[in-house]
Image: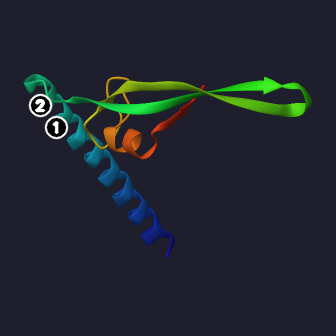
Amino acid sequence: MQRIAVQILKGLLMAAVLLYAGDWVVFHLRAMRGMAMGSIEVDQFLATPLKGHKEEFDYMGSADVACARALFPHDGAPACWWVERHKTHWE
């Protein structure tokens, strides 16, 4: 039973490595064509601490965030699908 569990873990690890490697290759192929990065508009808020362990939230406006059109983050930019689902940024 333990042997089967080890084999399953090895298979999952190998699948994850192959998925990331494939995503990296596709991202860099898109980068050569100039289509690897995107931009999504997000709302920015500032949390300011107040007395009595309270906070004030101030709307700072909207801003464009650079993102990678890939499954995983690349070149220091988050994945576009992640930014699309998390459009509120807190500072």
Residue that protrudes farthest toward the bottom in the picture:
1
Q: Determine which residue is flagged by label 2.
A: 29
38 relative to 86 in the view: left or right? left
Helix, strand or loop at disc 2? helix
Number of callouts? 2
Is residue 88 positioned above or below 37 on the image?
A: below
80 relative to 34 in the view: left or right? right
Q: Are marks 2 and 1 in contact (CB under 8 Å)?
A: yes
Looking at numbered disc 2 in the image, what kind of residue is underneath it?
Leu
Is residue 37 positioned above or below 2 on the image?
A: above
Looking at numbered disc 1 in the image, what kind of residue is underneath it?
Val
Q: Residue at x 25, y 37 (%)?
A: 69
Residues at marks 2 and 1, CA–CA distance in whole angstroms: 5 Å
Q: Which mark is residue 88?
A: none
Compare residues 65 and 60 and report the one nearer the observer: 60
Q: Tag 2: Cα neighbours inside 10 Å, few (<14), some, or many (≥20)?
A: few
Helix, strand or loop at disc 1? helix
Q: Residue at x 26, y 39 (%)?
A: 70
Is residue 80 positioned above or below 85 on the image?
A: above
Residue 86, how many percent across, how many down? 46, 42
Compare residues 46 and 34 and report the one nearer the observer: 46
Residue 88, how many percent across, how many down? 51, 37
Q: Determine which residue is flagged by label 1.
A: 26
Quadrant of the drawing holding the C terminus: top right
Q: Residue at x 77, y 31 (%)?
A: 55
